[in-house]
Image (cartoon, rainbow, N blue to C red):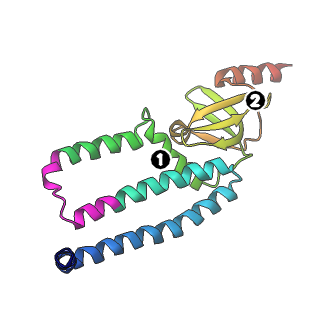
C-alpha cells in the first residue's frame, strides 16, 4: 500500500505542471461556458426564438468548446500530434469545407449561429429570399440547427436551409408582399397588367 502511495506521489510530483495546466484548461472551459451561454440565451430571447433553438445552440457550443478543451489537454500531456500531421491537415480541410461549403450539412450549423446572432432574423419578421429570378417569402417562425421555418401568408410551412439563407439576398420586412412563391418576372408582368388597367 505504501509503495502504491509513494508511486502515486512521485507521479504527481513529476507531472505537477501538466496537472496545473490541465486544471487551468478545465477552468477556462467552465468560465467560457458560463460567459457565452447566457449571451447566447439573450440573443435567442431578443429574437423571440423557441426554447428548442436554445437547447440546440447550447448543445453545439458545448460540444465544440469541449472538443477544443480535450485537444488542449491532450497536447499538454504530450500527445504526439506530429504523427497525425497528415491526418490533421486533411481533417482541417474537410472541416473547413464541411462548415462553410453550401452543400454541406455542417455549414447549416455554422449558418445557424450567424442567424441567431443577426438581429434582422427575429421571429415574426417577414422576409423575402431572392434566388436568382425566383423568390420565397414568409414570416420567420423558427430557426433550427439545419433550417429556418417560414410561414407563408396562406399558412403554408416552408423550410429553408440555413446556409442558403445567409448566402442569398434577403429583403427583411418588404413593403409589398406577393403572397406566393414564384418568379420575379411574373411579378413585373403582373405590375404591367395592373398599370394598363
Range of residues picked out in magenta: 70-86
Report whether residue 154 is seen: yes
Determine the residue located farthest toward the right in the rendered image: 197
In the rendered structure, are the residues bearing label 1 and label 2 in contact, judged by CB atoms less than 8 Å apart? no
Q: In which quarter of the image is the N terminus?
A: bottom left
Q: Name the residue under label 1.
A: 110
**Residue ID at (34%, 44%):** 96
Please say whether residue 85 is one of the residues in the magenta stretch: yes
Side (left or right) of 32 relative to 1: right
Q: Where is residue 46 in the image (x, y as percent from the top left)?
A: 69, 59
Say if 131 sits above or below 28 in the image.
above
Q: In which quarter of the image is residue 26?
A: bottom left
Alpha carbon separation for disc pair 1 and 2: 30 Å
Say if 121 sits above or below 131 in the image.
below
Say if 73 sits above or below 143 in the image.
below
Q: Mark 2 points at which residue?
A: 178
Depth order, front residue of 83/18: 18
Q: Position of residue 29 (x, y in %)?
A: 42, 67
Q: In which quarter of the image is residue 131?
A: top right
Report whether residue 121 is seen: no
Q: Where is residue 38 in the image (x, y as percent from the top left)?
A: 59, 66
Magenta span: chief secondary structure? helix
Q: Quadrant of residue 153?
A: top right
Determine the residue located farthest toward the front in the rendered image: 1
10 Å neighbourhood of mark 1: few (<14), some, or many (≥20)?
some
Side (left or right) of 109 relative to 130: left
10 Å neighbourhood of mark 2: few (<14), some, or many (≥20)?
some
Amino acid at each position: 500500500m505504501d509503495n502504491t502511495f509513494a508511486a502515486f506521489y512521485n507521479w504527481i510530483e513529476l507531472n505537477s505542471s501538466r496537472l496545473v495546466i490541465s486544471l487551468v484548461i478545465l477552468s477556462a472551459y467552465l468560465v467560457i461556458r458560463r460567459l457565452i451561454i447566457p449571451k447566447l440565451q439573450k440573443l435567442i430571447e431578443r429574437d423571440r426564438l423557441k426554447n428548442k433553438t436554445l437547447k440546440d445552440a447550447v448543445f453545439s457550443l458545448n460540444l465544440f468548446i469541449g472538443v477544443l478543451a480535450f485537444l488542449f489537454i491532450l497536447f499538454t500531456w504530450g500527445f504526439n500530434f506530429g504523427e497525425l500531421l497528415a491526418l490533421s491537415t486533411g481533417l482541417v480541410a474537410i472541416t473547413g469545407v464541411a462548415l462553410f461549403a453550401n452543400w454541406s450539412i455542417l455549414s447549416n450549423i455554422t449558418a445557424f449561429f450567424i442567424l441567431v446572432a443577426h438581429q434582422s432574423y427575429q421571429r415574426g419578421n417577414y422576409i423575402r429570399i431572392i434566388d436568382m429570378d425566383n423568390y420565397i417569402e414568409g414570416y420567420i417562425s423558427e430557426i433550427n440547427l439545419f433550417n429556418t421555418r417560414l410561414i407563408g401568408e396562406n399558412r403554408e410551412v416552408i423550410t429553408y436551409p440555413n446556409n442558403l439563407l445567409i448566402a442569398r439576398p434577403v429583403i427583411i420586412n418588404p413593403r409589398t408582399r406577393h403572397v406566393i412563391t414564384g418568379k420575379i418576372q411574373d411579378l413585373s408582368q403582373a405590375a404591367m397588367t395592373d398599370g394598363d388597367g
